[in-house]
Amino acid sequence: MKLAVSYNARGETLTMFNPGAATSEYGSLQYRPAPREKHVILEVPKNLEGKSVEELSKLLRVSVSGKKPKLESKGRGSSRK
């Protein structure tokens, strides 16, 4: 399952939605990120597939430490202040 995700420099998710649900026979939704936001399509970790987007938004953050961003559990690698 893939999600369209907007996030900030710390990897905090700002917007998350199913990109397949943004298109219909009547047109499509396009998302334009705000300044300083990044927006990408990312794969949901296998162990969390089947959960709703609402649940996933509470469970996931974007790992920004590697070459490519990826979704990870908020419990791993996040520094909360």
Image: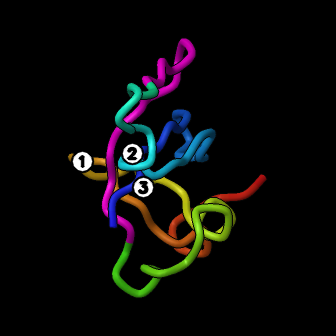
Inter-mark Cα distance, 2 to 1: 19 Å
Residue under the image location 55 percent in, 47 percent down: 16
| Res 74 quadrant in image | bottom right
Residue 45 in the image: state x and y as whole percent. 37, 75
**Nearest-to-viewer mark from 2 and 3:** 2
- Mark 3 touches mark 1? (CB < 8 Å): no
Q: Which amino acid does label 1 sit on?
A: Lys
Q: Is mark 3 on a helix, strand or loop?
A: strand
Q: What element carries label 1?
A: loop
Q: Which colour scheme is used?
A: rainbow
**Nearest-to-viewer mark from 2 and 1:** 2
Mark 1 or mark 3, which is nearer the start of the sequence? 3
Residue under the image location 59 percent in, 46 percent down: 13
Q: In this view, does 39 lie to the left or right of 52?
A: left
To which residue does mark 2 refer?
19
To which residue does mark 3 refer?
63
Q: Is residue 40 above or below residue 2?
A: above
Q: Is residue 70 left or right of residue 51?
A: left
Q: Considering the image in quadrants, where does the N terminus appear?
A: bottom left
74 in the magenta segment:
no
Residue 40 in the image: state x and y as whole percent. 35, 39
Which residues are drawn in magenta?
Answer: 30-44
Question: Any mark on residue 57, and which?
Answer: none
